[in-house]
Amino acid sequence: MPEIKPSEMITDVVVVEPDSHGDERGRFVETYRRSWFGLGREMIQGNRTEKQAGAIVGLHYHLHQADYWYVLRGQARVILHDLRVGSPTDGATLAIDLDGDVDRGVFIPPGVAHGFASHSDLLMWYLVDSYYNPADELGVAWDDPDIAAVWGVTDPVLSARDQDNPRRVELKAGLLPHYGLRT
C-alpha cells in the first residue's frame, strides 16, 4: 500500500510514497490516484519539465490550479509556501527533497506557492487540474527573506520571470489566494 502523508507544515499538501514493484526486467510504480487526495481535484493535463543542475523555478502560485509533482530522474529541492489568506498554516514554508531513485510525489493545492531547485540534471513529470491560463500564472520572489527558502543551490540559473516576481508583502490583495474557496 502506498503511504499517503498529509503535511504537518502546510494544510492540504500531501506527500505520497507509492509502492514500487520490480524484478529482473525492471520496475513498475503507480505514481498517482485521484482518491489519494482529499480535495478531490481531477487532474486533466500532464506535463514534463527538464532542467539543468543549478536551475531554480519559482516561486509560482495559482488561485485556481492544483499540481502533483513527481521526479523521474535527478534530484530536486521543492519549496512550498502557504500564501492562502485564512489558512491555518498561512506563512509556513516547507522544503521537500524529491529524487528519481526514491519514489515520492507531492500534491500542491491552489494558493500554495511552489518552486524547485535542480540539484542535478532533472526530469520531472507533473499533473495539473486545469488547462493553462495566463491570468492564473502568478509568482512571488524566490529569494524573499520573509519566506526564507533554503534552496541548496549557489549561483542559481533563473528565468527573467522568476527574477522579477514581487516579494510577498508586495502582492496585491486581489491576487492573494483564500483558504477554503473551491474553484
Image (cartoon, helix red, strand yellow):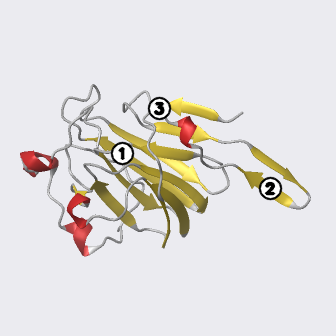
Label 3 or label 1, whichever lies nearer to me, is 3
Instruction: Locate residue 4, reporting x and y percent.
Output: 58, 33
Residue at image point 55% right, 51% down: 98
Which residue was labeled with disc 1? 80
- For residue 107, side relative to residue 156 (left or right): right
Disc 2 to disc 3, C-alpha distance: 28 Å
Pick the quarter of the image with the C terminus: top left
Residue at image point 65% right, 48% down: 103
Which badge, 2 or 3, comes first in the chain's sequence? 2
Which residue was labeled with disc 2? 27
Mark 3 touches mark 1? (CB < 8 Å)? no
Which badge, 3 or 1, comes first in the chain's sequence? 3
Residue at image point 44% right, 43% down: 41
Label 2 or label 3, whichever lies nearer to me, is 3
The one nearer the camera, 52 or 83, is: 83
Amino acid type shown at disc 3? Gly
Q: Residues within 10 Å of mark 1 (few under 14, many from 20)?
A: many
**Disc 2 on helix, strand or loop?**
strand
**Disc 3 on helix, strand or loop?**
loop
Instruction: Locate residue 157, reporting x and y percent.
Output: 35, 72
- For residue 38, side relative to residue 74 (left or right): left
**Mark sitting on residue 169:** none
Residue at image point 63% right, 33% down: 3
Label 2 or label 1, whichever lies nearer to me, is 2
**Disc 1 on helix, strand or loop?**
strand
Amino acid type shown at disc 1? Leu
56, above or below 99, in the image: below
Instruction: Locate residue 45, reporting x and y percent.
Output: 47, 61
**Mark sitting on residue 38:** 3
Instruction: Locate residue 118, reporting x and y percent.
Output: 47, 63
Pick the quarter of the image with the N terminus: top right
